[in-house]
Amino acid sequence: SQQGEEDPQALSIQEGENATMNCSYKTSINNLQWYRQNSGRGLVHLILIRSNEREKHSGRLRVTLDTSKKSSSLLITASRAADTASYFCATRYSGAGSYQLTFGKGTKLSVIP
Amino acid sequence: EAQVTQNPRYLITVTGKKLTVTCSQNMNHEYMSWYRQDPGLGLRQIYYSMNVEVTDKGDVPEGYKVSRKEKRNFPLILESPSPNQTSLYFCASSQAGSGSFYGYTFGSGTRLTVV
């Protein structure tokens, strides 16, 4: 079942601007992850945030998590043309022994040079 | 290099002709999974495996089979493919353990067309 839902579905920005993507989910989670997919290629893991964390940084990426609102956001600062890709959030729910990830439908980001 | 290897990359087949998509990982990961990706539907899980000889259905298992005889391999079998199985398929693997705070490593994908 689809748990994460990204918003917006598509986003177009100029190079150098910041890009913000949001993700909402429905049930209690163990952690939330963000992935990037270049057109037709495999997904690449970007960052993982645990349910007891509120913010995490990795290079130009900043992820926030609000478990009370069941939502997360991914901020890419100073975007580059190479950031053009689809971005997916994925949730691992908090049931015992669960290792499954449920993915949203993604946000398609276009960074215009 | 740590990786998940899928083969073939592209496959065109006819309805009803059995096929196997192979998946192999070199990271000694316990957990492996198959997803299909379709426009407008995102990624949907087909089957997953917690370890050797342990497999279970995901969200869309109909028409697929899997096996996990060795830790590194997790083939996806379509016994009688149909056109609605035309899709982009991904294999992924992950460590499993206390807390499950691990990301997935994905293969490059297999684009399957059933005519």
Image (cartoon, coloured by chain):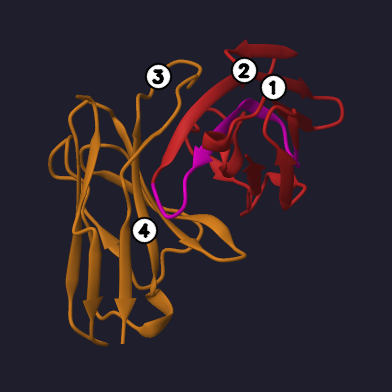
**Amino acid bearing label 3:** Gly
Q: Pointer 4: residues within 10 angstroms few (<14), some, or many (20+)?
A: many
Q: Residue at x 62, y 19 (%)?
A: A49
Q: Which mark is residue B89?
A: 4
Contact (Cβ within 8 Å) of mark 4 with mark 1? no
Residue hosting label 2: A60
**Amino acid bearing label 1:** Thr
- In which chain is the residue bearing label 4? B
Residue hosting label 3: B97
Q: Residue at x 71, y 31 (%)?
A: A28
SS majority, magenta: strand
What is the quadrant of residue B79 in the picture? Answer: bottom left
Q: Position of residue B93 (x, y in %)?
A: 33, 35
The hue of chain B in the figure is orange
**Residue at mark 2 shares a chain with residue at mark 4:** no
Q: Is residue A62 above or below residue B45?
A: above
Furthest toward the right, the residue is A69
**Amino acid bearing label 4:** Tyr
Q: CA distance from mark 1 to mark 3?
A: 33 Å
User: Closer to us: mark 2 or mark 4?
Assistant: 2
Instruction: Label 4, secondary structure: give it.
Output: strand
Q: Which residues are magenta?
A: A22-41
Q: Is residue B93 left or right of residue B13?
A: right
Identify the image quadrant of the C terminus of chain A: top right
Q: CA distance from mark 4 to mark 1?
A: 31 Å
Q: Which mark is residue A77?
A: 1
Between B15 and A74, the one nearer to me in the picture:
A74
